[in-house]
Structure formats: structure tokens, C-alpha cells
Amino acid sequence: MKISTFLTFVNDQCGKAQEALDFYISLFPNSSIKQVVHYREGDHGGTPDLIKYAVFSLNGEEFRLSENNYNHAWNFSPGVSLFIDCPSKEEAERLFRSLSSDGGQVMVPLDDYSGEGDYGFGKYFGWCADKYGVNWQLNLA
């Protein structure tokens, strides 16, 4: 049994899935787009310029993605995020800066939280949402 994270781009994010895929692939080593299937003319949920289904990997971890133009009452939520154990402080800073830029949002600034602010899983930590609304937690491993 394999479990994968599935990202669904809807509402204001619909139409940005390919851009997001290219952005994520550019940020992480050992990453690639494995499969992209677009809607066909007349398919429910999308037009040929939208991604019906995609499989990609970020640093060897597989993810799935879709987008549709239905009017959903939901979008990405901070309640679910992608957690990254970074190998160095510099890598955490590079990723945090890239992910939180251009319309992203900082939930918890990337900083040293040892002592009073220690979250229990790391001493150097930050949480942000990218410009697509996907939430990321970055931690120094």
C-alpha cells in the first residue's frame, strides 16, 4: 500500500497547477514530473488547458495533483501542510524565502525556537503558505 499527498487546485488556484508544478520541481533536488493528463474537450470539471491528473516527485517523494473549475466551498487549509526536514539552516532559509515570496504568507517566521518557543520537533522552524495556498513547515533536521 502506498500513500501519497494529493493537491487539488480549485477556485482562485484553478489554472495555476502547471505553474505550481514547475515551481516546486525547481526548488527541490531529485524532483520530476512523471505524468500529466489534461482534460479533453467536453470533460466535466475542466477544459483542455487544465490538469485533470498529474504525478510528480519532490526529492524522491511522490505527490499527485489535479485542478478543476467547479465552484468548491473549500481550498487549501493550514490544517494540512507539507513538513520538510531540511539538512541545513541555509537550505531551510532558501526554501522558506522562495515558498513565502510573491504573494505567499508567513504563518510562523523561520527562526530559532529553542527554549521557550520550542515546538518539540526542532529548534529552527518556520511555517508558510506559498502563492498557491499550499502550506509548508520547514524544520532543521
Image: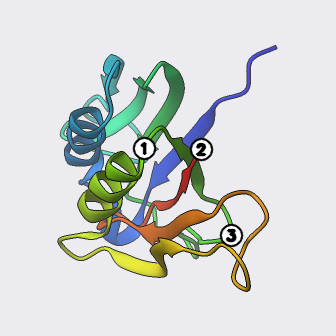
**Which circle, 3 or 2, is nearer the viewer?**
2
Could you give the CA–CA distance between mark 3 and mark 1, rounded to whole angstroms? Answer: 26 Å
Could you give the CA–CA distance between mark 3 and mark 2, rounded to whole angstroms? Answer: 22 Å
Q: Secondary structure at mark 3?
A: loop
Q: Residue furthest bottom?
A: 116
Q: Secondary structure at mark 1?
A: loop
Coloring basis for residues: rainbow
Q: Is residue 103 left or right of residue 54?
A: left
Q: Is residue 27 above or below residue 58?
A: below
Q: Residue at x 79, y 64 (%)?
A: 120
Q: Secondary structure at mark 2?
A: loop
Residue 121, percent across and down? 74, 57
Q: Amino acid at mark 2?
A: Ala
Task: Say which quarter of the image contains residue 35.
Answer: top left
Residue linked to disc 3: 79
Q: Is residue 81 above or below residue 62?
A: below
Residue linked to disc 2: 141
Q: Residue at x 39, y 34 (%)?
A: 52
